[in-house]
């Protein structure tokens, strides 16, 4: 307050808006604000004029129109008589599907490779660094195209499976790798299967409770329980019992060659596999680097301190090194998930019908509604990104070092 | 007595200790290293054997493919006939379509120009990459964009020269006003440059061109393709996005709420959407936002969108560097009586940029790789060339591996080179721990 009252009251001149540091900031912001408003206004004005000249308008009514195209890989039923909106939903689900699958496999690959790169085993460590360098330095699009062309050119046609001594065989008599996609068995949920699933979920909860109880016991009474064997038992025994008690309600429908193609089972198209494998390998290489960096960032003194406390090597890893490394690994890991989700839009290159392929591809070309389609596309990806960023912020807040 | 007798009985007494015997064979040399590192436990042995098997699989798949490769054939059928059932690559497609992969549909007579531009690009980059080179070479780096443009697109030489003059005019205005305020002078300089470009370049260039017709054969943008386009996009967008990224990063760190909000919104929006949607904007939407009747070159539109994309990422990298600087550096600047722009220019940015070199290089590599995405909006970059004219030709239908491996190898060489260079630069600039 005193600083303000010390200022001379009179003598404000127009020049002070530019020369006085107290007001200059406001002047610049004012100018910048109006420059932005003017710029956007100019663009919108141009857009309105251009659209008027073309006789178009902005409307999202096209989403209700009939799509008129088919989508091979889909999670919900879709035919060419459905609307563009439903096609977009199919696309959204396909994007989420490949992103979800990709995130899981990329994490597994990345963590494994990241740890193996630090191994004392020279051959393994070198092999892993070759993998990382090769995948990080070649564009993702090339990987997608390469793996997709393996899927569609190098694999045998369904007809190769026919005959007495076929050229190609199904893996384990249940999975067929063909150039029309991969056929895997489909689980059949018969009557009573809900109970088996319920038992399985209950046993998961029981394992969680067991672990909590074991820690409680350790902290209060100093006794340890054989947690691992008990958990494995809990995981398997009740579900298997329920499965046989209910009379085997969950079955598998195997793909079988009928006519020119395989029938039954789930058909996973080569485009999905190509995209999924390429995304996982590519992102896995980046995740491996963050994992390696995170583990190396935990100072050697921490390991030595744990050793001098008498912890065994596995305990050192799980109780001392990993919790500290995770704090460093997780933020880049989540941003890699975000990258993977955004990169899944490269599906367009192999004809996998994700949101970019449906809404931003065929729908856009058929209806000519480029404006609306691209806007919706951007909005969708923005929402996903903001959600992932929100999760990351929550995580960062919880694991932040509590400084006092 | 007995002692002397015993001494007399011994013919030899050793006075120095024996040299230590070498460790047993199993504990030294390569045998020990192999046993200790590769076969120290069951798990480790399994991993070693699995790794060796994987290497064997890779080598046995790749070596015959490369060694038996056919380099001289006219079509894939010819290739298969020459291979005669052996496993081998058909590299003849690369040998034959080499110009297409590198230059796209660029006119054959003008390849020399493109090659010259490519060589000059490295000459222009050299003083930026190697600090030992004389600083005077930076003048050439500054002039190169105009030479490069003229060599690749052709046309009259007066347009790039006048564009350069425009920059000189802007710089003169900036120098004249710099005493009063750095920021104001910068804005005035940019304004003068824009005015010169917008109002004077066109008429003067056509006037001069009719007087002194110094011109190269013009080349249309759609004729440019192959690796050339990846290079043009990569270098141009990288060069343009660095200053924009710095401005955005400073804006995001600023105390002025409206400036900060604008920068944050821009950065988060760009980082939230995939590049491919921005390329869709470039190919189908950008024309709507320009005054009716303006016709913009597709390469230029794509350059604008990729630059915006890269500058958002660049801003985040530089913000990391700014945030990593100790607060004392900012305070030191203030206590020396420097104003905001002076302390940024002289104290903060040189250090912050040094810290952010690894992330900037990562963005550069990512950007170069991302230039392949333009093939999705049907531009004929190297992947567009492969997927379009080459694979759909009757001669080379079905030659996938060789082409993709070639494109991948080219990208690998450049990206790996850049990343190795950045590690060298980091070591060189690391002045903190000597």
Image (spheres, coloured by chain):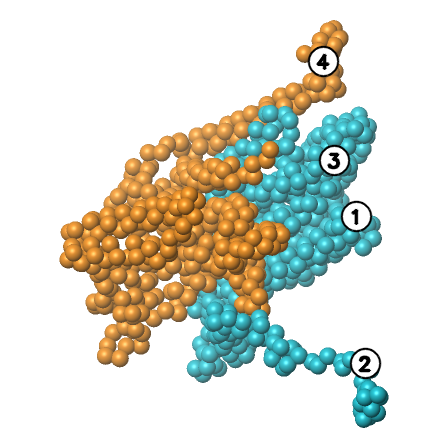
Chain colours: A orange, B cyan
Residue B104 in the figure: left or right of residue B20? left
Taking the image as drawn, is residue B159 in sight? no
Query: At numbered mark 4, what does the secondary structure look like: helix, strand or loop?
Result: helix
**Residue A162: x %, y % from top left:** 25, 74
Are the two marked residues, 2 and 1, in contact with CB atoms closer than 8 angstroms? Answer: no
Residue A248 in the figure: left or right of residue A361? left
Sequence order check, earlier mark of 2 and 1: 2
> Within 10 angstroms of label 2, few (less than 14), some, or many (20 or more) residues?
few
Disc 2 versus disc 3: distance between alpha carbons? 63 Å
Q: How many marks?
A: 4
Q: Identify residue for label 2.
A: B16
Q: Quadrant of the N terminus of chain B?
A: bottom right
Residue B18 in the figure: left or right of residue B218? right
Query: At numbered mark 2, what does the secondary structure look like: helix, strand or loop?
Result: loop
Q: Identify residue for label 4.
A: A3
Taking the image as drawn, is residue B139 in sight? yes
Numbered circle sitting on residue B139: 1
Disc 2 versus disc 4: distance between alpha carbons? 86 Å
């Amino acid at each position: 307050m005193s600083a303000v009252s010390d200022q001379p009251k009179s003598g404000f001149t127009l020049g002070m808006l530019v020369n006085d540091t107290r007001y200059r900031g406001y002047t610049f912001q004012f100018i910048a604000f109006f420059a932005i408003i003017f710029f956007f206004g100019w663009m919108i004005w141009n857009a309105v004029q251009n659209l008027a000249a073309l006789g178009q308008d902005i409307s999202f009514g096209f989403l209700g129109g009939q799509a008129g195209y088919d989508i091979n890989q889909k999670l919900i039923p879709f035919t060419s008589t459905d609307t563009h909106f439903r096609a977009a939903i199919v696309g959204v689900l396909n994007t989420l599907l490949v992103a979800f699958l990709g995130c899981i496999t990329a994490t597994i690959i990345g963590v494994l490779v990241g740890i193996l790169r630090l191994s004392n085993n020279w051959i393994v460590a070198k092999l892993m660094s070759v993998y990382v360098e090769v995948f990080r330095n070649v564009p993702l699009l090339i990987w997608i195209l390469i793996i997709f062309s393996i899927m569609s050119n190098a694999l045998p046609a369904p007809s190769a499976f026919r005959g007495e001594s076929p050229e190609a065989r199904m893996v384990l008599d249940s999975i067929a790798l063909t150039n029309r996609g991969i056929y895997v068995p489909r689980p059949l949920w018969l009557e009573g299967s809900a109970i088996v699933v319920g038992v399985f979920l209950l046993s998961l909860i029981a394992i969680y409770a067991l672990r909590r109880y074991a820690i409680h016991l350790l902290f209060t009474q100093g006794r340890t329980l054989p947690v691992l064997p008990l958990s494995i038992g809990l995981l398997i025994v009740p579900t298997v019992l329920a499965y046989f008690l209910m009379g085997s309600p969950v079955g598998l429908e195997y793909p079988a060659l009928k006519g020119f193609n395989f029938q039954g089972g789930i058909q996973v198209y080569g485009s999905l596999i190509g995209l999924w494998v390429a995304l996982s390998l590519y992102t896995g290489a980046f995740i491996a680097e963050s994992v390696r960096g995170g583990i190396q960032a935990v100072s050697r003194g921490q390991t030595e301190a744990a050793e001098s406390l008498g912890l065994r090597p596995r305990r050192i890893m799980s109780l001392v090194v990993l919790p500290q490394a995770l704090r460093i690994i997780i933020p880049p890991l989540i941003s890699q998930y975000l990258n993977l989700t955004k990169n899944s839009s490269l599906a367009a290159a192999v004809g996998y019908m994700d949101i970019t392929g449906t809404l931003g591809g065929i729908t856009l070309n058929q209806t000519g509604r480029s404006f609306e389609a691209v806007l919706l596309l951007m909005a969708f990806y923005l929402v996903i990104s903001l959600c992932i960023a929100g999760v990351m912020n929550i995580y960062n807040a919880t694991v932040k070092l509590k400084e006092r | 007595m007995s002692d002397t007798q015993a001494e007399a009985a011994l013919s030899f007494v050793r006075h120095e200790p024996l040299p230590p015997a070498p460790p047993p064979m199993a504990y030294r040399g390569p045998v020990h290293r192999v046993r200790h590192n590769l076969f120290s436990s069951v798990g480790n042995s399994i991993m070693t054997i699995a790794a060796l098997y994987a290497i064997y699989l890779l080598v046995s798949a790749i070596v015959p493919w490369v060694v038996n490769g056919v380099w001289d054939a006219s079509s894939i059928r010819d290739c298969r006939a020459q291979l005669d059932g052996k496993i081998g690559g058909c590299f003849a497609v690369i040998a034959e379509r080499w110009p297409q992969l590198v230059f796209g549909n660029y006119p054959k007579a003008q390849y020399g120009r493109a090659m010259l531009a490519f060589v000059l690009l490295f000459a222009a980059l050299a003083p930026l990459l190697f600090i030992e080179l004389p600083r005077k070479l930076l003048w050439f780096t500054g002039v190169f964009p105009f030479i490069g443009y003229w060599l690749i697109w052709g046309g009259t030489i007066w347009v790039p020269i006048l564009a350069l003059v425009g920059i000189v005019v802007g710089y003169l205005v900036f120098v004249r006003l710099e005493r009063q305020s750095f920021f104001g002078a910068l804005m005035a300089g940019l304004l003068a440059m824009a005015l010169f470009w917008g109002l004077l370049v066109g008429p003067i260039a056509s006037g001069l061109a009719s007087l002194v017709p110094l011109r190269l054969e013009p080349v249309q943008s759609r004729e440019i393709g192959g690796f050339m386009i990846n290079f043009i996009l990569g270098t141009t967008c990288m060069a343009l996005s660095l200053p924009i990224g710095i401005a955005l990063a400073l804006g995001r760190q600023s105390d002025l709420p409206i400036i900060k909000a604008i920068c944050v919104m821009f950065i988060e929006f760009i980082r939230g959407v995939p590049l491919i949607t921005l390329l869709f904007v470039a190919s189908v939407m950008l024309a709507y936002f320009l005054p009716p009747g303006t016709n913009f070159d597709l390469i230029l539109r794509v350059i604008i969108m990729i630059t915006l994309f890269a500058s958002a990422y660049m801003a985040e990298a530089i913000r990391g560097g700014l945030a990593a600087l100790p607060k004392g550096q900012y305070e030191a600047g203030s206590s020396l009586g420097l104003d905001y722009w002076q302390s940024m220019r002289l104290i903060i940015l040189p250090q912050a940029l040094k810290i952010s070199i690894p992330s900037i290089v990562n963005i550069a590599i990512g950007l170069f790789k991302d230039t392949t995405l333009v093939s999705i909006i049907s531009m004929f970059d190297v992947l567009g060339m492969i997927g379009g004219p080459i694979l759909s030709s009757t001669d080379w239908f079905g030659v996938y591996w060789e082409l993709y491996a070639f494109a991948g190898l080219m990208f690998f060489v450049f990206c790996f080179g850049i990343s190795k260079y950045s590690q060298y630069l980091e070591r060189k600039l690391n002045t903190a721990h000597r």
